[in-house]
Amino acid sequence: MDATAAAAIRTRALGDPDVAPPGEPVSDAWRPWRSYAVRHLRTQAGQPGAGAEEERLLTA
């Protein structure tokens, strides 16, 4: 399992709100809500595929 999959599982399945997505520079100032903050900011920015990787992992 790669780091992205592990982060998605920790966030979505286990409900861990403080997962720093791999390869993303996330400030410690967002603690303890880093994973939720990153997901919200991606969604608001309208980035294509903001949840596509997580959806792929959860439906595989």
Image (tube, rainbow, N blue to C red):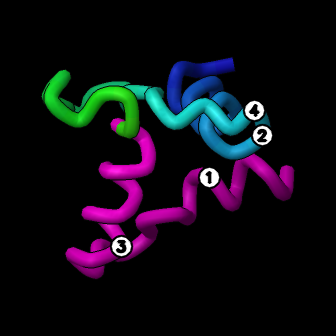
> What's the residue type where badge 1 is placed?
Glu
Which of the two marks, 4 or 1, is nearer to us in this view?
4
Q: Are marks 4 and 1 in contact (CB under 8 Å)?
A: no
Q: Earlier in the sequence, mark 1 or mark 3?
A: 3
- Work out whether 53 lies above or below 9: below
Q: Which mark is residue 13?
A: 2
Q: Are marks 2 and 4 in contact (CB under 8 Å)?
A: yes
* Residue marked by disc 1: 54
Residue 14 has which mark?
A: 4
Are there few (<14), some (14-19), or many (20+) residues within 10 Å of tag 2?
few
The quadrant holding residue 18 is top left
Residue 36 within the segment the image draws in magenta: yes
Q: What secondary structure prevails in the magenta region?
A: helix
* Secondary structure of the residue carrying numbered label 1: helix
Q: Residue at x 56, y 53 (%)?
A: 53
Report, in whole angstroms, how far the alpha carbon at label 2 lies from the one at label 4: 4 Å
- Side of 50 relative to 58 (left or right): left
Q: Residue at x 68, y 38 (%)?
A: 15
Label 1 – label 3 distance at C-alpha: 13 Å
* Mark 4 in CB contact with mark 3 (< 8 angstroms): no
